[in-house]
Image (cartoon, rainbow, N blue to C red):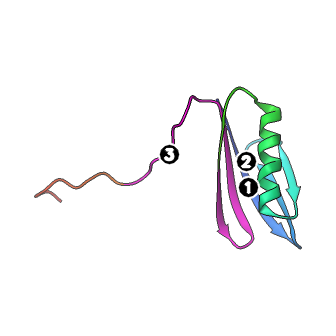
């Protein structure tokens, strides 16, 4: 299973992305095209299975994009706190 995390920034109408802790990168004029290119870039490095991706805009000019390749079917990511037991703080 390969996990690829990219830090994306926009400047002058162009989006660029560089892999966090790696050498992969891409650029495009829109976030849509950038995501497509980054998935293809990740697949060129690891084509071992299905692809999941997540794009999170941090500000109008920055984002984080993650591509997960392989690792079985379906799974998602769940985050959050546990439930509070009644009568305890």
Of circles 2 and 3, the one toward us is 3
Which residue is the site of mark 2?
A: 20
* Residue stretch in magenta: 54-80
Residue 33 sits in which quadrant? bottom right
Examine the rendered structure and indicate whether residue 36 appears above or below residue 46: below
The residue depicted at 53 percent of the width and 36 percent of the height is: 74
Of circles 3 and 1, the one toward us is 3
Which residue is the site of mark 3?
A: 77
Examine the rendered structure and indicate whether residue 55 appears above or below residue 59: above
**Which one is earlier in the sequence, the residue at label 2 or at label 3?**
2
Assign the C terminus to one quadrant of the image. bottom left
Q: x, y percentage for residue 29?
A: 87, 64
**Which one is earlier in the sequence, the residue at label 2 or at label 1?**
1
Apparent side of residue 82 relative to residue 42 in the rendered image (left or right)? left
Calculate the distance from the C-alpha at mark 2 to the C-alpha at mark 3: 20 Å
The residue depicted at 68 percent of the width and 57 percent of the height is: 64
The residue depicted at 87 percent of the width and 59 percent of the height is: 28
Apparent side of residue 1 relative to residue 9 in the rendered image (left or right)? left
Disc 2 and disc 1 in contact, CB within 8 angstroms: yes
Given residues 82 and 31, the one toward you in this image is: 31
**Which one is earlier in the sequence, the residue at label 3 or at label 1?**
1
Disc sitting over residue 7 in the figure: 1
Q: x, y percentage for residue 82?
A: 30, 51
Calculate the distance from the C-alpha at mark 2 to the C-alpha at mark 1: 6 Å
Q: x, y percentage for residue 75?
A: 51, 38
Given residues 39 and 66, the one toward you in this image is: 39
Task: Please check the rendered image and state whether residue 53 is part of the magenta-colored stretch, yes or no.
Answer: no
Apparent side of residue 69 relative to residue 35 in the rendered image (left or right)? left
């Amino acid at each position: 299973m390969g996990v690829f995390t990219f830090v994306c920034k926009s400047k002058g109408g162009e989006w660029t992305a560089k892999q966090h802790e790696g050498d992969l990168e891409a650029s495009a004029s829109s976030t849509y095209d950038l995501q497509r290119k980054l998935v293809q870039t990740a697949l060129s490095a690891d084509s071992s299975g299905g692809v999941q991706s997540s794009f999170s805009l941090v500000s109008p000019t920055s984002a984080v994009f993650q591509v997960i390749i392989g690792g079985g079917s379906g799974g998602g990511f769940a985050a959050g706190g546990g439930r509070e037991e009644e009568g305890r703080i």
